[in-house]
Image (cartoon, grey):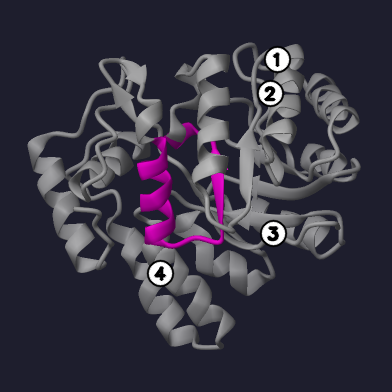
Amino acid sequence: MEQAFSGIFAPVLTPIKDGSVATEIISESVKFTQACGCHGLIAAGTGVQETVSLTVDERKKIISGAIKAADERPVLAGVSHPSTHITLELAAYAETAGADGILAMPPWGLSPGNDAVISYYESLVEATDLPILLYNNPTVTVDLSTETMRRIARLENVEYVKETSRNWKKLAWLIEHVDNAGLASVFGTMDVLLPVMEAGGHGAVIPAPASTPAMRVYEAFQNGDREAAGEAQRAFVDFPPDEVNTSLMPAVKAAANLSGVPLGPPRPPYQPVSDEGQTAIQQWLEREDVPSLE
């Protein structure tokens, strides 16, 4: 592998003002993401970044803005789209803008079959020299089988695999037959960060502010302190808090707003977190000593 990404990669949350992307605030979102702790950044690529609601032009602005605002940490640019043509357009833009890698979910919308998904990644591999993170997120698009993911991981430049489900059997299979087999490094999510590391995985994709305790888990594990790693992992039991009766995206945006980053509300039709939910999030932020930009 030309690159060696590992650890905690944090999606840069999308600032929304009056229903539009507030490009002038992207740098503040990057600053907050880095302050919370991470080994790398993701731009315009995941569900918590409201990717499916963004136009191609908006995604390009977010990608370039994140790359310009980032410090020395690598930036992976999201290029997923229902259209292979637009995916390749975004990949070319990301490479020109200076991205260090590409994040690609399968195309969403019409539930493409395995052959169509594999063809999609084959086209992407042929179009870019950047390392690719295969991102399986069944809440946004199709749920890839382990064998399909292994087939894709065999493609040149597909060097990383992120499994979003909390299905431990699936994650363990991927670590054994993809990561340990030398095909691609496997990443999990916050709920299973420590088990993934213990099984031989390489990290997780976790948004700020949850990336703050995630860094504690990762660093404690790397230092051989399993007790401290286990204690830090417990932070995810209460995030998002039970009072937040919504998906993760509105919760992390609320957390950023409470931390002094004016990201605004979720883009409609998604709704902001209730007052009760915001109070619970504020308590979690204080308990986990999450940095504030206020």
Q: Residues within 10 Å of mark 2 (few under 14, many from 20)?
A: many
Cα distance between the residues tagged 3 and 2: 21 Å
Left-right relation of 55 to 246: right
Q: Is residue 62 visible?
A: yes
Q: Are the two marked residues, 4 and 3, in contact with CB atoms closer than 8 angstroms?
A: no
Picture coordinates of residue 129, whole percent (x, y)? 86, 39
* Crowding near the residue tagged with mark 1, few <14, some 14–19, many ≥20 C-alpha atoms within 10 Å: some
**Element at label 2:** helix
Residue 30 point in image, percent of width and height: 43, 46
Residue sitting at 40 percent across and 69 percent down?
Answer: 233
| Discs 1, 2 touching: Cβ within 8 Å | yes
The mark lying in front, picked from 3 and 2, is 2
Q: Position of residue 61 (x, y in %)?
A: 52, 25
Residue under circle 4? 233
Q: Is 31 left, or right, of 121 in this rendering?
A: left
On residue 280, the disc is none
Q: Earlier in the sequence, mark 4 or mark 2?
A: 2
Which amino acid type corresponds to the residue marked 1 in the rendered image? Ile
Q: Disc 3 versus disc 1: distance between alpha carbons?
A: 26 Å
Q: Residue 5's mark?
A: 3
Badge 1 element: helix
**Marker disc for residue 90:** 2
Q: Which one is earlier in the sequence, the residue at label 3 or at label 2?
A: 3
Q: Mark 4 vs mark 2: give the one in front.
A: 2
- Find the magenta span and give its range: 26-48
Contact check, label 3 and label 1, Cβ < 8 Å: no
| Residue under numbered circle 1 | 86
Q: Amino acid at mark 4?
A: Gln
